[in-house]
Image (cartoon, grey):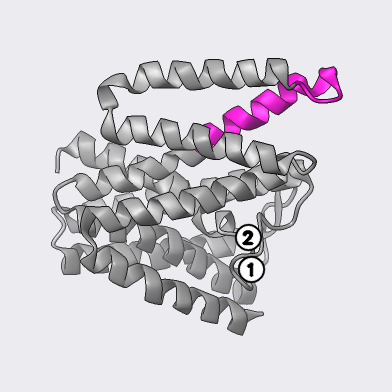
Amino acid sequence: MTAKRVLAALVGLAIIVPLILFGGVGAIVLLVTVAGVIATIEYAHMAFPDDSTVMSVVQVVAVGVTCAAALFWPGHAGLTSIGVVCGILVLQTFRPGADLDRTADRAGRVFVGVGWLSLFAFVVLLRREEHGLSWVFLVLSIAWLGDTGAYFAGRFLGRTPLYERISPKKTWEGVVGGVVLATAGMLVVREIGDLPLTIGQCLVGGPILTLTGVVGDLCESMLKRSFSVKDSGWIMPGHGGLLDRVDSVLFVAPWLYAWVRFLEI
């Protein structure tokens, strides 16, 4: 299984890294769009197993409109969000499902998916910032090195469960390994990408952002347990679905963006 995980990761990196490096903002928009559509369909299949085709379309449209408003019409993002909320409620009113007692649950599942997956937009917003290319690589390094460090540290050193009810295999030792590797990665990206961060900021921000990614991972695990599924999909051999790989990114990106804007760097 480990060999399959490594091979799948290397194939993904061989495609993604050159696009990010040489494709400019347009490549990030393309990557985020493709990833967003795949992840949204995966979510719809988990949340609505008996109505996945229609709800996949609904979720993709709602997430797409929300992200487009945030990226291209920020002055109208609030109004667009109101329209999306009203549209979802109207849809559930005229398509309540066989069990009326579960209609509010169905609507809630749509709202959770739209709110969660619309966080993809922050990757594009980071790319638009000064040093945008480096910020994007910082998000990926923190999220993926954090996952990698946690996986190997947990596998070989893990003894103390982190949150057994939600994610039985995660351990505190794994969290420490992820924090160490991701923070080291942040220092490397700082140097290579010429980011305007001090070493002290990296030593503080690295662990905080890594722990943010851990929380994002736990949130996805909670949803999967709620939906009674093991993986979000099958697109990445050894890893599960795309959502299983980007759950940390979806939490790290907005918080890094908020930090960048707060520090005005």
Mark 2 vs 1: CB contact within 8 A: yes
Q: From what the image shows, is residue 202 above or below residue 254?
A: below
Q: Which residues are magenta?
A: 96-116
103 in magenta: yes
Instruction: Indicate the secondary structure of the residue bearing disc 2.
Output: strand
Disc 2/disc 1 C-alpha distance (Å): 6 Å
Q: From what the image shows, is residue 16 above or below residue 2?
A: above
Q: Looking at the rendered structure, which numbered label has been put on residue 231?
A: none
Q: Nearer the viewer, residue 114 or 133?
A: 114
Q: From what the image shows, is residue 259 above or below residue 164?
A: above
- Residue 261 is left or right of residue 153, and the answer is left
Crowd tier of the residue under label 1, counting other residues whose Cα lies within 10 Å: few below 14, some 14–19, many 20 or above: many
Q: Looking at the rendered structure, which numbered label has been put on residue 158?
A: 1
| Residue annotated with mark 2 | 171
99 in magenta: yes
Of the 4 image quadrants, the one containing the C terminus is top left
- Residue 120 is left or right of residue 215, and the answer is left
Q: Mark 2 or mark 1, which has the lower sequence index?
A: 1
Q: Residue at x 36, y 35 (%)?
A: 68
Which x, y percent locates residue 101? Answer: 83, 18
Kind of residue at disc 2: Thr
